[in-house]
Image (cartoon, rainbow, N blue to C red):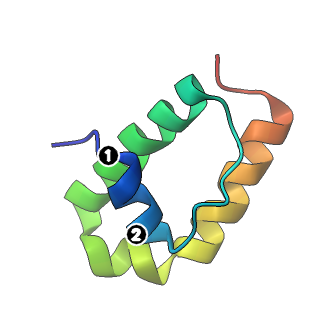
């Protein structure tokens, strides 16, 4: 599956307050989709705070092009 919708992303992470441009958010949807496939929804929800913090750092460092 990999890519997930923004709606699914927001549901899994429990927030719509995520930084990033449209291409950056598409990359986040892809990566969270991969984690969802590998580990399941409960794992993603359980790690949401860590995933959001890592995402904020990634966007701040401008490492996604």
Q: Residue 8 at what x, y percent from top left?
A: 33, 59
Please tell me which residue is depicted at 21% across the width and 56% down the height of the picture.
37
Q: Quadrant of the N terminus?
A: top left
Query: Where is residue 11, by image quadrant?
Result: bottom left
Q: Earlier in the sequence, mark 2 or mark 1?
A: 1
Residue 17 in the figure: left or right of residue 39: right
Label 1 residue SS: loop
From the viewer's side, name the closer residue of 11 and 59.
11
Looking at the image, residue 38 lies above or below residue 4: below
Percent x, y of residue 19: 71, 46
Q: Quadrant of residue 25?
A: top right
For this orientation, the residue located farthest to the left is 1
Vertical side of 17 occupied by 28: above or below: above
Would you place residue 42 above or below residue 54 in this image? below
Residue 12, label in figure: 2
Image side of residue 40 versus residue 46, left or right: left
Q: Which mark is residue 5?
A: 1
């Amino acid at each position: 599956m990999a890519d997930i919708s923004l709606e699914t992303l927001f549901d899994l992470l429990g927030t719509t307050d995520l930084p990033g441009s449209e291409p950056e958010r598409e990359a986040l949807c892809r990566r969270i989709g991969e984690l969802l496939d590998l580990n399941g929804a409960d794992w993603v929800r359980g790690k949401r705070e860590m995933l959001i913090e890592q995402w904020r750092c990634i966007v701040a460092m401008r490492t996604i092009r």
